[in-house]
Image: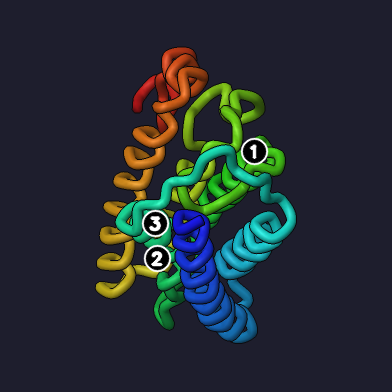
Amino acid sequence: MAVKKQRAFLEGTFNVVGAATYILSCGFLVLDFLTTHRISDILMLGRRFLFALFFIVRKTPPKQTNTSPRDWLVAFCGTYMQNFLRPTPQGHDSIIIGIIQALGFIVCIGGALSLNESFGVVAANRGVKSKGMYRFMRHPIYAGYFLEAGAFLAQNLSIDNIIIMLIWAAFQFRRIFVEEQFLSADPAYVAYQKKVPWRLIPFVW
C-alpha cells in the first residue's frame, strides 16, 4: 500500500509539473509561429500534442513499476527538459535540417505507435515490445527525440539552448541505462536485448 501511495504521489507531482512545461513550451512555439510561420515550430508542436494525447489514452497498467525517486527524476528530466528549448529571434529554418527534424518526428510517432498502449514516462514493465520499430532498436522514441531536438537546436542556436540540450542529453542517456537495468529483471527482456543489440542507432549503438 505504501509503495502504491508513493508511486501515485510521484506520478501526480511529475504529471502536473510536466504538463506545465508542455503548456509553456507550446506557448512559446505558437507565438513564434504566428510571427515567423516556421515549419520547425509546427513539427515540435505536433509531436508534443500527439505525445500528450498518447500519454492520456494509451496507458496500460504496468506489471511492475520503478519506484525509486532518483530514477523518477531521471525519467522526468529525460522527458520534459527538452521542452525548455526555445525558438530564437535570429533562428531560421533550413530545408535539410528540417528534413532531419521531420524524420525525428516520424521516428518518435512510429515508436509510440509500436508500443501500442504501453506508453509511460518512468520505467515500468508493461510487457516486452519487440514489434514495429522495436525490431530494429531498443529505444526508437529516444532516437527520434535526439533527431528532432538536435535539428531544432541547429536551427535555433543560443547558449541557453545548447546548455539545455547538453543537460537533457545527459539525463536521456542515463534514462536509457536506468530503464534497461530495471527491465533486465524480466528474462523476456534479456532475451530481447540479445535479439536486438542496438539501443539508438542500428549497427552502431
> Mark 3 packing: few (<14 Cα in 10 Å), some, or many (20+)?
many
Is 179 drawn above or below residue 3 in the view shown? above
- Which label is found at residue 72? 3
Amino acid type, residue under disc 2 in the picture: Met
Residue at image x 48%, y 75%? 17
Q: Quadrant of residue 26?
A: bottom right
> Do the CB atoms of the residues marked 1 and 2 lie less than 8 Å apart?
no
Q: Nearer the viewer, residue 183 or 194?
A: 183
Residue at image x 57%, y 64%? 44
Residue 70 % position (x, y): 30, 56
Q: Nearer the viewer, mark 3 or mark 2?
A: 3
- As helix, strand or loop, the secondary structure at mark 1 comes to loop
Q: Marks 1 and 2, Cα distance to the nearest angstrom?
A: 22 Å
Q: Marks 3 and 2, Cα distance to the nearest angstrom?
A: 13 Å
- As helix, strand or loop, the secondary structure at mark 3 comes to helix
- Which label is found at residue 81? 2
Residue 183 % position (x, y): 44, 32
* Res 106 seen here: no
Q: Marks 3 and 1, Cα distance to the nearest angstrom?
A: 20 Å
* Res 48 seen here: yes
Q: Nearer the viewer, residue 200 or 174?
A: 174
Is 48 drawn above or below residue 109 in the view shown? below
Looking at marks 3 and 2 on the same chain, the residue that comes earlier in the sequence is marked by 3
Is 104 drawn above or below residue 200 in the view shown? below
> Do the CB atoms of the residues marked 3 and 1 lie less than 8 Å apart?
no
**Residue linked to disc 1:** 115
Amino acid type, residue under disc 3 in the picture: Trp
> Do the CB atoms of the residues marked 3 and 2 lie less than 8 Å apart?
no
